């Protein structure tokens, strides 16, 4: 653990100074961002002391059990960070939904595409682009960078071709796994969970093959946790649906109420899934 001194700006534009412990600079930036602060300056306290260390000095080896624990993905932490990012960036997520999904779908509704196979393909492409934009927004947020929706959209469009190719390959691989048996499908789905975040990370000049192999590498040792995260969102959806169904009996327009709350719940949890994949990627990369 290293000690970092930071200067950051809070939501009222006031400057705050503080100290925190983190394994890496990226992790320190993410912790500052999670506190709702915009980092201005970050300095490691041990940096000035390095030139004075003896040449023969070697760091104390870390026990294998401790190193293994550091690489374990904390599911509760992932869920907590996901909810915080969802809260902080809710307006940008809404803006992305309007630009990428609602706008094009509204235009398509007035054309022959709306009831054709081509229209369904376009709709799937829009969903993939929307997922990638959410991932890009989340990665920028966790790194303490200023999030601009226009830049995130532009970055996604630049990687549009490898993004679509990667999504098709990952979907086919998971589909084949589930066709063979459920267990291989679960393993493949967990191994490829962070494929899109790897591809969308602007710090990586990546292609489809690298994204797939890097996702497989990062998720090793954490796939049971990732499998558990896959179960959480469907369970939350079923719970919220059950609550909505119960409440619908107290409203005159119960069917409309149930329909609206169902769509809203599904939309929020779908967005949360994209955020969760990016949060998982950042956490796994920090532990790498």
Image (cartoon, rainbow, N blue to C red):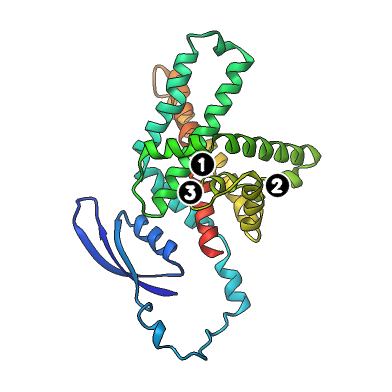
Left or right of 161 in this view: 42: left
Instruction: Pinpoint residue 188: horizontal percent, then vertical percent.
Output: 70, 47
- Number of the front mark, 2 or 3: 3
Please name the residue shown 62% across and 75% down the image.
65
Give whichever of 245, 235 is nearer the camera. Answer: 235
Mark 2 and mark 1: span between their CA atoms? 17 Å
Split into 4 quadrants, where in the image is the C terminus?
A: bottom right
Mark 1 and mark 3: span between their CA atoms? 17 Å
Mark 2 and mark 3: span between their CA atoms? 25 Å
- Number of the front mark, 1 or 3: 3
Left or right of 182 in this view: 268: left
Find disc 3 in the rendering and name its residue. Answer: 202
Find disc 2 in the rendering and name its residue. Answer: 188
Find disc 1 in the rendering and name its residue. Answer: 274
Please name the residue shown 57% across and 22% down the image.
122
User: Crowding near pointer 2: few (<14 within 10 Å), some, many (20+)?
Assistant: many
**With respect to residue 45, does 152 lie above or below?**
above
Can residue 149 be seen from the camera position used here?
A: yes
Residues at circles 2 and 1 in contact by the CB criterion of under 8 Å: no
Please name the residue shown 42% across and 47% down the image.
83
Can residue 270 be seen from the camera position used here?
A: no
Instruction: Pinpoint residue 35: horizontal percent, then vertical percent.
Output: 33, 57
Q: Secondary structure at mark 2?
A: helix
């Amino acid at each position: 653990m290293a000690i970092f001194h930071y200067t950051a700006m809070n939501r009222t534009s006031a400057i705050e100074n503080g100290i925190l412990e983190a394994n890496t600079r990226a992790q320190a930036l993410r912790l500052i961002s999670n506190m709702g602060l915009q980092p201005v300056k970050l300095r490691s306290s041990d940096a000035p002391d390095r030139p004075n260390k003896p040449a023969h000095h070697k760091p104390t080896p870390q026990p294998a059990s401790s190193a293994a624990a550091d690489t374990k993905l904390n599911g509760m932490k992932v869920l907590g960070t996901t909810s915080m990012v969802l809260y902080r960036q809710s307006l940008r997520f809404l803006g992305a939904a309007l630009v990428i999904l609602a706008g094009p779908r509204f235009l398509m509704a007035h054309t022959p595409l709306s009831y054709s196979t081509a229209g369904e393909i376009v709709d799937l492409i829009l969903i993939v682009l929307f997922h990638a934009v959410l991932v890009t927004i989340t990665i920028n947020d966790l790194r303490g960078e200023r999030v601009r929706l226009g830049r995130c959209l532009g970055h996604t469009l630049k990687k549009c071709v490898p993004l679509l190719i990667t999504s098709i390959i990952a979907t086919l691989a998971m589909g084949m796994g589930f066709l063979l048996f459920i267990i291989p499908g679960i393993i493949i789905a967990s191994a490829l969970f962070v494929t899109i975040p790897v591809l969308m990370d602007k710090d990586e000049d990546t292609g489809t093959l690298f994204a797939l192999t890097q996702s497989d590498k990062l998720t090793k040792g954490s796939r049971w946790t990732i499998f558990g995260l896959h179960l959480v969102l469907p369970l939350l959806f079923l719970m919220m649906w059950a609550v909505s169904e119960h409440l619908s009996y107290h409203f005159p327009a119960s069917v409309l109420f149930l329909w609206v709350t169902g769509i809203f719940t599904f939309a929020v949890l779908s967005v949360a899934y994209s955020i969760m994949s990016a949060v998982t990627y950042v956490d796994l990369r920090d532990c790498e």
